[in-house]
Amino acid sequence: MPELLGSIQPTALISAPIPAAQYLRMSTDHQKYSTQNQADAIAEYASRRGYAVVRTYADGGRSGLLFKNRAALKELIAHVRSGQADYDTILVYDVSRWGRFQDVDESAYYEFICREAGIQVLYCAEQFENDGSLASAILKTIKRAMAAEYSRELSNKVFIGQCRIAKLGFWRGAAAGFGLRRHLIDEHGRTRTQLEFGERKFLQADRVVLRPGPPHEIEIVRRVFKDFVKERKSATAIARELNAADIRTVRGNAWTPGRVSDLLFNERYIGNIVYNRKSFKLKQQYVRNPPEMWIRCEKAFEPIIPPKLFEKAQKLRAKRRRRCRRILPDRQALDEVAALLEKKGRLSLDIIRQSREVPSATTLIKRFGSIVAAYDLVGFKLEDRYRRSEARTRISHVIAAETRKLAVRLNELNLQVDISDKLQIVFNGGLIVSVCVARPVAHLPGKHRWQLRWGKRGARTAPSNLTLVIKMDETNSEIARYYVLPVRAAELARLSDKKLRVHTRIFADEYKCSDLETVAAAIARRAVADGPW
């Protein structure tokens, strides 16, 4: 027996280290909060307490306010909830590294999730043990409140500093805007370099100013203002012309009415810097501040638009907004449209936009469902070729509604399906059913041909195993028949062409279904079949 005891190594009597994970969150507020310093402190704590760090979660972002912006903490909580955690303890430098959540209960909630899964959270640099005692609970609550208050105080100090810098005429923003560029200057006002998109200053003492950009961009900005003020063009029309001329934004994107509006109504183009129009303090929610809270520095840099032209643009914008915001009874709105029809002899979107007497096209669409419906109510009949968009919309609605009904019936047959794409039904077994509409098109007097129409122009879907064709009646108002077509009969590779005239043999009786119940049964047979259908 003495020989046996002597053969046992001393290390075998020492218990194995406890597996632990460490959570690190970077902060530049103090040097002590660098991730390396946190890791060193946690390593020292782990060696004293008998822990072995087996996994590291590190958030590189500075802010600890929002859980959704912290990928590492989200991953940690996901592992804990799913039971994938291969550790018994989570080591954190201190309470503030766990999070500076503005609601202290949120910090406690994430710790509770870990504790409920049998995983303890320990704070290595705190003066208390996180052992669930009354003293521990009180101190943790105080520390969490202090961390949240620190963020609030820091946010207020930063905001005051930003306002002071904006008053001095320095730029406090990201992109400068089309026709403008950001320039970096040193503390003596000497230009260092021009900042490209995404670049930031690299010295605390440096400042950023705005200056006019390339001459060709300046000419485009001036052209936009003249088109809006003198030619009375809308933002939509201006965006369309810019895109047609292959003119892109600074980032290479196409112009939209919103981007044109931002250009037309931004005081940067007359040399003014306006700060604090919106607030996003503590990353809670965006707030539109009243004008008296704005910080404005006039003539901060050389303007590229004359102030009088800019003022005219603002007056025109306000006039158009008042017209759009008029609240009229439906009858009065239609009377004004009818008067415009009598005056012009016809109606169009351009005629409505240029008229100052009638409600805007957007208002008419909201009131009456579509611009075509408003035309019908005042007795103006569009030619058939202008009603195609209305037919496409109706067909798209038919596809979506019938797909939803079919999915409900298939689920009742214990077939799990996905209809995230309204053009296809995907089964959990891999079967894909495409959905399309065959609509009638006049061919000869009293005769029609049917064309296959997918619900979305230009849509490209995955190769399917079956195609459900919804055949409309000759009036294109009701569903006449359903057809469930296999690949070889429908030749799906060619059916992606919307203008393909469907041959009569496609609508053979063997593929015909009278209602959705028959369709669901046919698809269910194919879903459970072993061989080709």
Image (spheres, grey):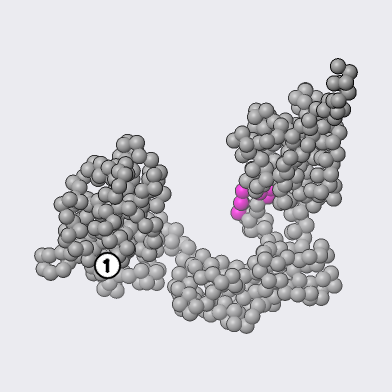
Q: Is residue 331 visible?
A: no
Q: Residue at x 65, y 32 (%)?
A: 113
Q: Is residue 320 visible?
A: yes
User: Viewed as shown, does residue 439 lie left or right of 153?
Assistant: left
Q: How many marks?
A: 1
**Residue 374 to residue 66: above or below:** below
| Location of residue 432 in the rendering, given as x and y in whole percent from the top left corner | 36, 50
| Location of residue 422 in the rendering, given as x and y in whole percent from the top left corner | 37, 52
Task: Give yes or no for residue 1 being in the magenta stretch.
Answer: no
Q: Quadrant of the N terminus?
A: top right
Q: Residue at x 60, y 68 (%)?
A: 266
| Location of residue 50 in the rendering, given as x and y in whole percent from the top left corner | 82, 32
**Residue 237 to residue 453: above or below:** below
Q: Residue at x 38, y 40 (%)?
A: 416
Q: Which residues are magenta?
A: 281-288
Rendering quarter of residue 459: bottom left
